[in-house]
Image: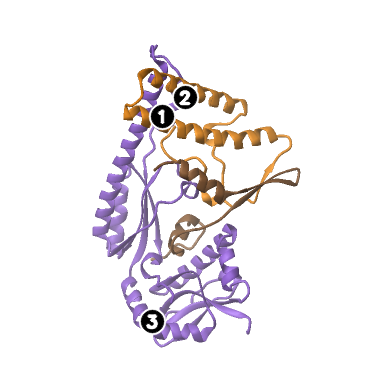
């Protein structure tokens, strides 16, 4: 059986298989205007505060 | 090369052919380290870029992660063309070839068992989502405060919203139950199975909730039966996605010590 | 494939809409949370009828206001879900409507 080794493979499916414990990525957004960075938002802080609002 | 580390992709039988991989992680050439009846498929990589700290940061960079994961996958798939493969998780790095040989000696029995487990078998992935319904986007149709001419429009609104949520909840329950039933049937067809967490909808590209994310190890007959079963469930409370055939990532990966 | 956005680059010509989108996404999240909580209270049955009515009216008007605001900025409901990269969207991907 030939095994698929091409770009049809979705990254998310690859990551399920290749990473133990899943993807942990911290991201930060810098909001900029006219090349001037104006606001830096730490997503971790934002997400954790939002998720405590949302009850299961 | 003093400043190189060794990146491990997978372990195979020593008598398997060299994998015809164009290039591996970081575009490094792919080669093998043989010890006894086993061979490790590896690349030499830059010690600084693949040292523990740099690697940790790289794993957090999604663009790097994507390139590395795809390169890793191509090497594993190429190796799988020549026989059974025990794939190793991403970013498994050793100090040198000697360490890799030591690994093959120390864990020889585990690797042999893994290779025997996957010999002649492949992995298929099955993902299930709650099937979309017209209802999901129909809320726009209920004009706010609309037309039952109710004397208590506010209360009607709340009751309507509650009913919508309840319906959606019921659909989710039905989908979940159907997914569990399907998983049991697929498990019966397969040699082994493994479940993953539902994928983040942002990554999976689906709006509807994912209710099954699993991998099944099958031989050829089992594979045919699996695909047929998935095809027969195409209409119903579930939306199904089949991926594969994969090298047996979910069934042979070893934790590194 | 989503890439980690390092910059949310506001276009000076469309900055109103971009900021509007950011703000509306947060307001929409709060609106959904409020609605969910209100339904819970109604189900618990510990609110007098008049209170339920006023609560419902308020939420209904909030929903209408959100629709108007969205339309004003030329946004659909799906747009109010800022792509935070692999961390996911702000809004819960649930049957909330």
What kind of element bears circle 3?
Answer: loop
In the image: residue B114, left or right of residue C74: left
In the image: residue B119, left or right of residue B74: left
Q: Nearer the viewer, residue A55 or A4?
A: A55
Q: CA distance from mark 1 to mark 2?
A: 9 Å
Label the purple chain with its letter: B
Q: Nearer the viewer, residue C11 or B71?
A: C11
Residue A55 image point, x, y percent? 41, 41
The residue that mark 2 highlights is C59
Asked whether disc 1 touches disc 2, contact meaning CB atoms under 8 Å apart, the reply is yes
Q: In this rendering, do the residues under marks 3 and 1 share a single chain?
A: no
Label the orange chain with its letter: C
Asked if residue B238 shows in the view, the reply is yes
What kind of element bears circle 1?
Answer: helix
The residue that mark 3 highlights is B107
Tell me the mark number nearer the camera, choosing from 3 and 2. 2
Residue B52 image point, x, y percent? 56, 72
Tell me the mark number nearer the camera, choosing from 3 and 1. 1
């Amino acid at each position: 059986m030939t095994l698929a080794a091409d770009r049809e493979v979705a990254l998310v499916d690859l990551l399920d298989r290749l990473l133990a414990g899943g993807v942990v990525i911290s991201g930060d957004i810098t909001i900029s205007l006219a090349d001037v960075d104006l606001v830096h938002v730490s997503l971790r802080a934002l997400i954790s505060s939002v998720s405590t609002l949302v009850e299961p | 090369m003093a400043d190189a580390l060794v990146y491990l992709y997978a372990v195979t039988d020593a008598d398997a052919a060299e994998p015809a991989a164009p290039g591996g992680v970081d575009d490094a050439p792919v080669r093998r380290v043989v010890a006894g009846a086993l061979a490790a498929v590896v690349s030499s990589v830059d010690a600084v870029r693949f040292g523990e700290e740099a690697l940790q940061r790289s794993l957090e960079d999604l663009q790097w992660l994507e390139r590395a994961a795809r390169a890793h996958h191509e090497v594993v798939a190429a190796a799988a063309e020549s026989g059974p493969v025990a794939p190793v998780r991403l970013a498994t790095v050793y100090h040198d070839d000697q360490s890799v040989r030591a690994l093959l000696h120390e864990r020889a029995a585990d690797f042999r068992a893994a290779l025997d487990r996957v010999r002649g078998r492949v992995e298929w992935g099955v993902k299930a989502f709650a099937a979309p319904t017209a209802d999901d986007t129909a809320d726009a149709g209920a004009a706010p405060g609309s037309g039952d001419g109710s004397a208590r429009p506010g209360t009607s609104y709340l009751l309507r919203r509650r009913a919508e949520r309840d319906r959606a909840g019921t659909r989710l329950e039905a989908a979940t139950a159907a997914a569990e039933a399907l998983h049991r049937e697929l498990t019966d067809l397969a040699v082994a199975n493994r479940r993953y967490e539902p994928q983040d909808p942002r990554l999976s590209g689906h709006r509807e909730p994912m209710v099954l994310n699993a991998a099944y190890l099958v031989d050829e007959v089992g594979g045919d039966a699996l695909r047929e079963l998935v095809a027969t469930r195409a209409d119903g409370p579930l939306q199904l996605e089949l991926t594969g055939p994969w090298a047996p990532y979910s069934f042979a990966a070893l934790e590194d010590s | 494939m989503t890439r980690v956005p390092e910059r949310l680059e506001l276009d000076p010509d469309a900055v109103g809409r971009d900021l509007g989108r950011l703000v509306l996404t947060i307001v929409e999240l709060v609106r959904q949370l409020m609605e969910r909580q209100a339904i819970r209270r109604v189900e618990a049955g510990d609110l007098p009828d008049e209170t339920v009515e006023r609560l419902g009216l308020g939420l209904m008007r909030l929903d209408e206001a959100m629709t108007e605001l969205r339309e004003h900025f030329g946004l659909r409901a799906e747009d109010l879900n800022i792509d935070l990269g692999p961390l996911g969207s702000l809004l819960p991907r649930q049957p909330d409507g």
